[in-house]
Image: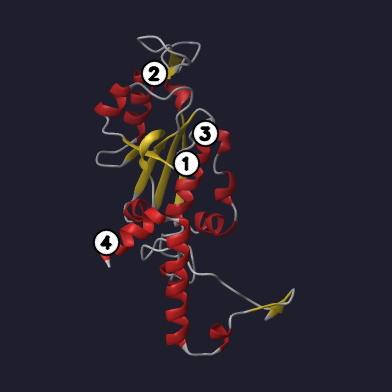
């Protein structure tokens, strides 16, 4: 069973949407489980203080290293991966999701305020990740996205596992356009090649479409694709 363990100041935000649909069914089947760790319970004073002002001045507050360290030490086994969600982290992508999905667990620290003390990141070998070049009010919503991306790769959750192989990023390209019934909708027709029954032509058309879309929308991915091919 895969374990997603979330360290948060707002445990009631979980499992949220992860309890619905395929993920909810997979949880009942014990394919995966969610563990919520309330960071505030590991505070050292009667006021349950989890943050303090940063040394050197500056705006905002920082999450205290002793509190985070205690929460991690009490709940994480040796060699388990721990990640902290922060705008300065390296980009979390499909490759990373695949790597984590092959493990038995993931531990995600959801930051608040201005982040956490650097010392706890270094001493607990915490890896920093970001979803992109934007700021969120906290790591909880990002954690939901990351867990979603991992769970859908676990065996037994998505019935048609072949559909995963054709998705965006699987071959370095964005996914081709998709069409379904009705064949004609608002005077727009499905491309003839998709009605031909010629699987070789369809495969070639889809590849050309993926290349064109990637070249237009994601020049960075297109450049990487060309280097590999």
Q: Nearer the viewer, residue 209 or 198?
A: 209
State the residue at coordinates (27%, 68%). 229
Residue 143 is marked as 1
State the residue at coordinates (62%, 79%). 190
Residue 182 visible from this viewpoint: no
Measure the alpha-carbon separation of dots 3 and 2: 20 Å
Q: Which residue is mark 2?
A: 64
Query: How many marks overall?
Result: 4
Q: Which residue is mark 3?
A: 136
| Category of crowding for the residue at label 2, using alpha-carbon neighbours closer than 10 angstroms: few (below 14), some (14–19), many (at least 20) | many
State the residue at coordinates (57%, 87%). 195
Measure the alpha-carbon separation of dots 1 and 2: 20 Å
Contact flag, marks 4 and 2 (Cβ < 8 Å): no
Residue 43 visible from this viewpoint: yes
Where is residue 172 drawn, in percent x and y?
A: 36, 62
| Relative to 218, residue 183 above or below | below
**Disc number lying in front (4 or 2):** 4
State the residue at coordinates (31%, 64%). 226
In the image, taking residue 222 as reference, residue 124 lies left or right, namely left
Mark 4 vs mark 3: which is more N-terminal? 3
Where is residue 90 drawn, in percent x and y?
A: 34, 40
Q: Which residue is mark 4?
A: 227
| Relative to 208, residue 94 above or below | above
| Relative to 169, residue 96 above or below | above
């Amino acid at each position: 069973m895969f374990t997603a363990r979330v360290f948060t100041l707002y445990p009631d935000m979980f499992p949220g949407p992860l309890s619905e649909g395929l993920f909810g069914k997979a949880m009942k089947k014990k394919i995966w489980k969610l563990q919520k760790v309330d960071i505030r319970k590991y505070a050292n004073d009667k006021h349950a203080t989890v943050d303090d002002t940063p040394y050197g001045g500056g705006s905002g507050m920082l999450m205290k290293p002793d509190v985070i360290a205690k929460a991690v030490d009490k709940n994480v086994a040796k060699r388990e991966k721990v990640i902290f969600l922060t705008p300065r982290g390296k980009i979390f992508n499909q490759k990373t999701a695949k790597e984590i999905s092959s493990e038995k667990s993931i531990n995600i620290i959801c930051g608040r305020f201005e982040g956490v003390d650097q010392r706890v990141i270094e001493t607990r070998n915490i890896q920093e990740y970001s979803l992109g070049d934007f700021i969120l009010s906290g790591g909880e919503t990002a954690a939901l996205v990351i867990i979603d991306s991992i769970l859908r790769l676990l065996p037994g959750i998505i019935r048609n596992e072949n559909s995963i192989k054709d998705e965006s990023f699987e071959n370095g390209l964005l996914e081709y356009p998709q069409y379904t019934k009705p064949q004609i909708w608002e005077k727009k027709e499905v491309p003839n090649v998709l009605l031909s029954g010629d699987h070789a032509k369809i495969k070639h058309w889809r590849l050309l479409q993926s290349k064109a879309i990637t070249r237009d929308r994601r020049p960075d991915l297109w450049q990487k694709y060309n280097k590999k091919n």
